[in-house]
């Protein structure tokens, strides 16, 4: 004992266990105060592989009707969609703040002036504190990046890129009309502007093996990425993919909920630990979904992933850290 203070050294201080994975709410909490909710919007954009600029027909798996939320109508203005969404959530959380989520199709694929007008309309709605912009890696014109770079100094801005796969053979097969080098370059361009970036990845695309899917984590971990959204391949009515699988079901690797959870755990173990994971699965409307119909809500699936990580003593980045040391 020295003075009036004592130091206890008879018991070692236990080391705090690492978190299971970095969650999207924890990422948002680093940038925004209070509870924040995204409001999904359909601003009437299209895509360069739909209108003939690069291709026609769109991605083989895509039916954008699956993006429509239970609030708002696509024939409404951005302001009306935002206000409908806010009314939907504010009943339960009156003090909630909101992010305008430009989700459907390619939300930078228009004139720069048109994009800016739509973004600013959303930001003018009371309670909106930022933007999340879903787009393609080949649709980031420099003048728009100039605007977003300046915008990010006053509000939250996250640009979410649909990468879908890191394998060029897959990107060709699903008619993405860009390669992985384009995806990597786009992420570096966003980072050079000080912009937050997210990636969207589909696990289970045609021709990919489970090891291919795990390797996506290795590739993405080497890129300047802040967030990632994962989901299982869903076969949707009216898509090219639905016809392809009807003709040859062997083109995709079948998953059960348990085997998909195992894949996710392996993916997380290889993923850089600072990348925030927004989701693991997606749910398309039952009237559009062909397969897989697992009958699990997103939160229930997340719970299964967390249980598996906890039971195995694993966590995000476990194997990434091993590779760094080797």
Image (cartoon, rainbow, N blue to C red):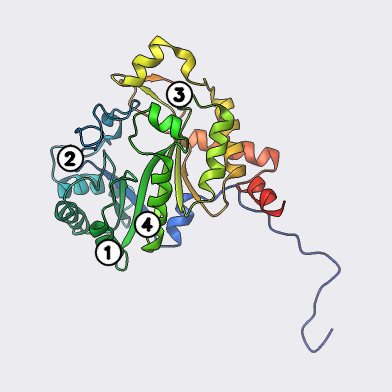
Q: Using the numbered discs, state the Cα–Cα distance from disc 3 to disc 4 in whole angstroms.
A: 29 Å
Provide the secondary structure element on which disc 2 rests.
loop
Q: Is residue 1 above or below residue 300?
A: below
Provide the secondary structure element on which disc 3 rests.
loop
Residue 117: give x, y in percent of width and height.
15, 55
Q: Which residue is mark 1?
A: 151
In front: label 2 or label 3? 3
If you read the primary sequence from the N terminus, does the residue marked by circle 2 or circle 3 appear first?
Answer: 2
Q: Using the numbered discs, state the Cα–Cα distance from disc 1 to disc 4 in whole angstroms.
A: 13 Å
If you read the primary sequence from the N terminus, does the residue marked by circle 2 or circle 4 appear first?
Answer: 2
Q: Which residue is mark 2?
A: 44
Provide the secondary structure element on which disc 1 rests.
helix
Q: Tell me the residue at 44%/59% (across/down).
A: 29
Say which quarter of the image contains residue 112.
bottom left
Q: Which residue is mark 4?
A: 190
Q: Tell me the residue at 65%/53% (across/down).
A: 18
Query: Is any atom of residue 24 visible in this view?
Result: yes
Is 103 situated left or right of 263 in this image? left
Q: Using the numbered discs, state the Cα–Cα distance from disc 2 to disc 1 in whole angstroms.
A: 22 Å
Residue 7: give x, y in percent of width and height.
80, 77
If you read the primary sequence from the N terminus, does the residue marked by circle 3 or circle 1 appear first?
Answer: 1
Q: Which residue is mark 3?
A: 206
Q: Residues within 10 Å of mark 1 (few under 14, many from 20)?
A: some
Q: Residues within 10 Å of mark 3 (few under 14, many from 20)?
A: many
Q: Do the numbered discs 2 and 1 sit on residues whose CB atoms are within 8 Å?
A: no
């Amino acid at each position: 004992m020295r003075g009036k203070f004592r130091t206890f050294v008879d018991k070692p201080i236990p080391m705090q266990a690492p978190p299971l994975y970095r969650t999207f709410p924890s990422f948002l909490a680093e940038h925004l105060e209070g509870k924040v909710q995204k409001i999904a919007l359909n601003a009437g954009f299209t895509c360069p592989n739909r209108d003939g600029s690069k291709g026609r027909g769109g991605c083989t798996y895509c039916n954008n009707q699956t993006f429509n939320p239970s609030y708002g109508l696509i024939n409404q203005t951005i302001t009306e969609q935002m206000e409908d969404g806010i009314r939907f959530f504010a009943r339960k959380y009156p003090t909630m703040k909101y992010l305008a989520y430009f989700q459907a199709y390619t939300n930078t694929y228009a004139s720069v002036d048109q994009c800016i007008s739509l973004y600013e309309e959303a930001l003018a709605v009371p309670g909106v504190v930022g933007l999340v912009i879903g787009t393609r890696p080949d649709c980031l014109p420099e003048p728009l990046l100039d605007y977003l770079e300046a915008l990010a100094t006053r509000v939250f801005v996250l640009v979410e890129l649909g990468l879908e796969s890191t394998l060029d053979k897959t990107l060709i097969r699903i008619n993405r009309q860009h390669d992985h080098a384009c995806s990597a370059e786009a992420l570096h361009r966003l980072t050079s502007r000080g912009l937050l970036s997210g990636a969207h990845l589909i696990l289970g695309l045609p021709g990919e093996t489970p090891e291919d899917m795990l390797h996506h984590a290795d590739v993405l971990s080497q890129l300047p990425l802040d967030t990632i959204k994962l989901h299982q391949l869903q076969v949707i009515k009216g898509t090219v993919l639905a016809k392809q699988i009807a003709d040859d079901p062997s083109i995709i690797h079948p998953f059960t909920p348990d085997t998909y959870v195992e894949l996710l755990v392996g993916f997380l173990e290889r993923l850089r630990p600072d990348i925030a994971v927004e989701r693991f699965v997606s749910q398309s409307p039952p009237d559009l979904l062909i397969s897989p119909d697992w009958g699990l809500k997103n939160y229930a699936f997340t719970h299964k992933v967390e249980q598996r990580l906890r039971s195995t003593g694993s966590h995000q980045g476990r194997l990434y850290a091993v590779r760094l040391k080797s």
